[in-house]
Image: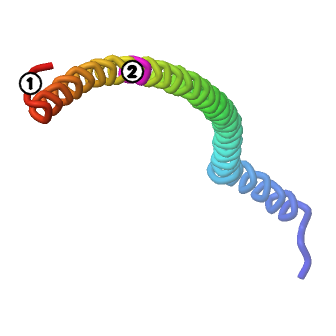
Amino acid sequence: MHLYPAEILYIFALGILLYLVLKKQLFDPIGKILKDREETVENANSFIADATEEIESLKNKRDKGISKATTEAYEIGEKARSEGGEKRKEIITSAREDAYDKLKQTRSEIRKRSDEVKKTLQKEADKFARDIASRLLGREI
């Protein structure tokens, strides 16, 4: 089979025409779809990277906030314990002082009553002694 130069040119022209039609109808749209897809993927990756950075930033802020809050809570607790200890000491000291004052007062009252009772008993004893002596002797003393 032998091809003539006109046939070769005709086949070559048809090949170029086929290439141009396929390029316009197939290759260019597919290339555009692939390019759009690549841009979409790049945009998505960029969005994911930005979101990841923002998430990490928020996590760091949260962790710092939690750490700060924990430290503040510990400090508040320590302060409350310290103040509570001091308040407890003040209350105990005040209660002791009150107890000692009441004890002194009670002792003073007991001594006072004891002295009164002694005087009363002494008077009563003297009276009974005179009564007994008067009855025994049969006369008033």
Observer-nearest residue: 53 or 1?
A: 53
Give the CA separation, mark 2 to mark 1: 51 Å
Element under disc 2? helix
Magenta span has 106? Answer: yes
Q: Residue at x 71, y 39 (%)?
A: 49
Give amino acid for label 2.
Lys
| Residue span colored magenta | 103-107
Magenta span: helix, strand or loop, mainly? Answer: helix
Whether residue 24 can be seen here: no
Of the two numbered discs 2 and 1 in the rendering, the one whose residue sits closer to the viewer? 1
Residue 85 horizontal/vertical position (percent): 58, 28
Give amino acid for label 1.
Arg
In the rendered image, the vertical position of residue 10 relative to residue 97, given as above or below: below
The residue lying furthest to the bottom in this view is: 1
Q: Residue at x 65, y 37 (%)?
A: 59
Q: Residue at x 12, y 27 (%)?
A: 134
Residue 108 horizontal/vertical position (percent): 39, 17
Q: Which residue is mark 1?
A: 139
Say how many tags the image has: 2
Observer-nearest residue: 48 or 56?
A: 56
Q: Which residue is mark 2?
A: 102
Residue 14 horizontal/vertical position (percent): 75, 57
Q: Is residue 64 left or right of residue 106?
A: right
Q: Is residue 6 left or right of residue 36?
A: right
